Amino acid sequence: MEMIELTEKLIESAEQRSAGQPYPQFVKNLKAIGVDNYEVKVKNHKRTYTSVNGEKLIIAGDLPEFECAETFELEEVKAAIKRTQDGITDYPTFLREIGAAGIHTYVADLTGMKVIYQGPNSEYEYEEMIPEV
């Protein structure tokens, strides 16, 4: 795979190509441009993308900031994930819902094909596999 320098414009183009499609398509588009993983701060949507060669790109938060709950509610996390997967909620609503359920950060591991939802401290987390496309 040719190494491509990560830029905000490159990430935006992957997002646009994935618009209206299931999340695994976005993952496929990110992998195609050399993204290995990315981390999202739930409270404001700040993203840190890491390429397969270790290069990092930080994109500032672009949603109104809110406080994430300090209590981790696993069933509420799972319910919020299901609602967004089923197309019931949009992405900003999804972030607010998982934040209210105690998720502060999530990491999408595109090599391991999983998303790790992390609570207020490292003992609280929930993992979900990303289906292949």
Image (cartoon, helix red, strand yellow):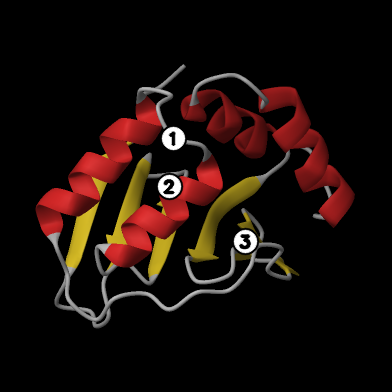
State left or right for residue 29 relative to residue 43: right
The residue nearer to you, when weighing 28 against 119, is 119
Mark 1 falls on what kind of element?
loop
Q: In the figure, residue 55 lies in which quadrant?
A: bottom right
Dots 2, 1 in contact, CB < 8 A: yes
The residue nearer to you, when weighing 19 against 88, is 88
State left or right for residue 60 relative to residue 85: right
Q: Which residue is mark 2?
A: 94
Mark 3 falls on what kind of element?
strand
Q: Amino acid at mark 1?
A: Thr
Q: Which residue is mark 1?
A: 89
Packing grade of label 3 (10 A; few <14, some 14-19, many >=20) is some
Residue at mark 3 to residue at mark 2: CA–CA distance: 23 Å
Q: Is residue 114 above or below residue 116?
A: above
Q: In the figure, residue 65 lies in which quadrant?
A: bottom right
Q: Is residue 76 visible?
A: yes
Mark 2 falls on what kind of element?
helix
Residue at 16% across, 71% down: 124
Residue at 37% across, 72% down: 104
Packing grade of label 2 (10 A; few <14, some 14-19, many >=20) is many
Q: In the figure, residue 16 lies in which quadrant?
A: top right
Q: Amino acid at mark 2?
A: Phe
Residue at mark 3 to residue at mark 1: CA–CA distance: 27 Å
Q: Earlier in the sequence, mark 3 or mark 2?
A: 3
Q: Is residue 14 above or below residue 42?
A: above
Q: Which residue is mark 3?
A: 50
Q: Is residue 5 visible?
A: no
* Camera-side mark, 3 or 1: 1
Residue 44, position as x, y percentages in the image:
58, 69
Dots 3, 2 in contact, CB < 8 A: no
Q: Amino acid at mark 3?
A: Thr
Residue at 22% across, 79% down: 122
